[in-house]
């Protein structure tokens, strides 16, 4: 092509590049940058977006130009020109994308490594996904009380669980993630972290909160009938170190109390509110839960007495506690009319999933829910 014909194309290409750069510099696609990692992730994304905009404009612009420039004229019945190809052009449009892919691969790897780096003083929080709720287990603070034996500390640790994610500003956090049932994906958009929760495995992700904020922990993996509701259950609270320490101390005091009487009804109430996802599928007015996947549990203590006395279902007899216990560990044994089986977790009879103390505490709490 002659230079006077090339110049317009170079000018248009330069304009496309400028537009792409402006889009990359000004795009605000994601929510608040709530972590140090969010800055590098957003920068990489905006760089990729700028390249995508330039490529889009060149391709679509070329298509539109070709449609107009080489359209069939009225009365033109001739064949098109016998153009075989252009080796230089083909090498160019192969080499440029190859270079772009290599550059993006290097940058992506650098960002990934930067977001997955551990530190000596990082805070480790265990994250458990379940249908349909997240729960978070926190490390215990030091306790000088000599009465707190190692055995008691181990029991207290099992109650250091909360349904909300609390993290301090400026401290590196390592989330150790697993699932007790199906695939989930731990996702906090403000932190720019998303990591699969896989049954039987522990996966990891890291983030460093940089500012106080309230957000949601989302599930980014279709995990069942109430997947959508799972993203409006668990809050994220990023606070300064003093507020985080106060939360941990309060949680420890409550956990210590629960460990001293692990089967009390109040323990069961706390477990349903913080550790197990009963409220995401069942209505319990006392706890303010609004799940509608399964039958309401209001008055379940009275109904269990009636069912047991009548010898109904798989669990029969006259023991209301046995009826509720059996309905938890074998949820398909007796189904309330209008509800199908297979929706409730089938593994609560496994002590590794629901320890016996937790099961008995929940049963004892549900027995207190009498008809008003």
Image (cartoon, rainbow, N blue to C red):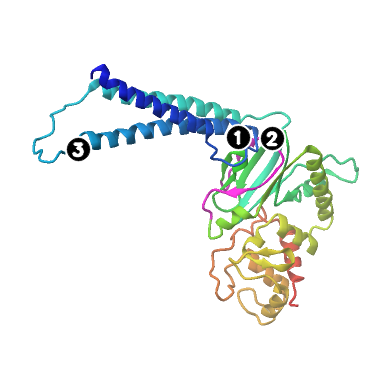
In percent of the image, x 53 and y 57: which residue is there? 224
Q: Secondary structure at mark 1?
A: helix
Task: Compare residues 72 and 86 and report the one nearer the observer.
Answer: 72
Q: What residue is disc 3 on?
A: 71
Residue that lies at the very extreme toward the bottom in this rendered image: 310
Packing grade of label 3 (10 A; few <14, some 14-19, many >=20) is few
Spatial distance from mark 2 to mark 1, Cα to Cα?
A: 10 Å
Task: Locate residue 257: give its quadrant.
Answer: bottom right
Eye-nearest disc, 3 or 2: 3
In percent of the image, x 54 and y 68: which residue is there? 341
218 magenta-colored: yes
Residue 184 lies, with reference to residue 337, above or below; the image says above
Q: What residue is disc 2 on?
A: 210
Query: Where does the N terminus fall, quadrant-wise?
Result: top left
Q: Earlier in the sequence, mark 1 or mark 3?
A: 1
The spot of residue 274 in percent (x, y) is: 72, 55
Q: What residue is disc 1 on?
A: 38
Residue 368 in view here: yes
Q: Secondary structure at mark 3?
A: loop
The magenta stretch spans which residues? 198-223
Task: Compare residues 46 and 192 and report the one nearer the observer.
Answer: 46
Packing grade of label 1 (10 A; few <14, some 14-19, many >=20) is many
The spot of residue 12 in percent (x, y) is: 35, 27
Q: Is residue 64 left or right of residue 192?
A: left
Residue 131 in view here: no
Tag 2 and tag 1, C-beta contact below 8 Å: yes
Q: Earlier in the sequence, mark 3 or mark 2?
A: 3
Spatial distance from mark 3 to mark 2, Cα to Cα?
A: 57 Å
Query: Where does the C terminus fall, quadrant-wise?
Result: bottom right
The spot of residue 61 in percent (x, y) is: 32, 34
3 magenta-colored: no
């Amino acid at each position: 092509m002659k230079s006077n014909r090339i110049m317009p194309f170079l000018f248009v290409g330069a304009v496309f590049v400028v537009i792409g750069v402006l889009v990359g510099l000004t795009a605000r696609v994601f929510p608040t940058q709530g972590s140090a990692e969010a800055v590098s992730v957003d920068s990489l994304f905006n760089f990729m977006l700028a390249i995508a905009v330039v490529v889009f404009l060149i391709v679509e612009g070329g298509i539109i130009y070709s449609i107009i420039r080489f359209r069939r004229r009225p009365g033109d019945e001739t064949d098109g020109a016998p153009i075989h190809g252009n080796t230089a052009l083909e090498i160019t449009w192969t080499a440029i994308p190859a270079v772009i892919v290599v550059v993006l691969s290097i940058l992506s790897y650098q960002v990934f490594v930067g977001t997955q780096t551990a530190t000596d003083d990082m805070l480790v929080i265990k994250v458990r996904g379940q249908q349909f709720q997240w729960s978070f287990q926190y490390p215990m603070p030091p306790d000088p009380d000599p009465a707190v034996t190692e055995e008691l500390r181990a029991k207290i640790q099992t109650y250091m669980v909360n349904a909300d994610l609390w993290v301090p500003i400026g401290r590196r956090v390592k989330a150790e993630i697993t699932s007790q049932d199906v695939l989930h994906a731990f996702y906090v958009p403000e932190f720019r972290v998303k990591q699969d929760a896989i049954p039987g495995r522990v996966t990891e992700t890291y983030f460093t909160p940089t500012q106080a904020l309230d957000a949601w922990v989302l599930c980014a993996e279709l995990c069942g009938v109430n997947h959508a509701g799972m993203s409006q259950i668990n809050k994220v609270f990023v606070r300064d170190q003093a507020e985080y320490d106060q939360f941990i101390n309060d949680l420890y005091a409550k956990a210590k109390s629960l460990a001293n009487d692990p089967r009390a009804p109040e323990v069961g109430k706390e477990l349903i509110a913080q550790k197990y996802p009963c409220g995401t599928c069942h209505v319990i007015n006392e706890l303010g839960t609004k799940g509608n996947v399964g039958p309401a549990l209001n008055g379940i203590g009275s109904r269990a007495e009636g069912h047991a006395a009548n010898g109904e279902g798989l669990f029969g007899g006259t023991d209301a506690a046995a009826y509720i216990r059996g309905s938890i560990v074998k949820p398909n044994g007796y189904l309330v009319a209008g509800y199908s089986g297979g929706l409730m977790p089938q593994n609560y009879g496994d002590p590794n999933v629901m320890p016996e103390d937790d099961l008995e505490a929940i049963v004892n709490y549900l027995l207190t829910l009498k008809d008003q």
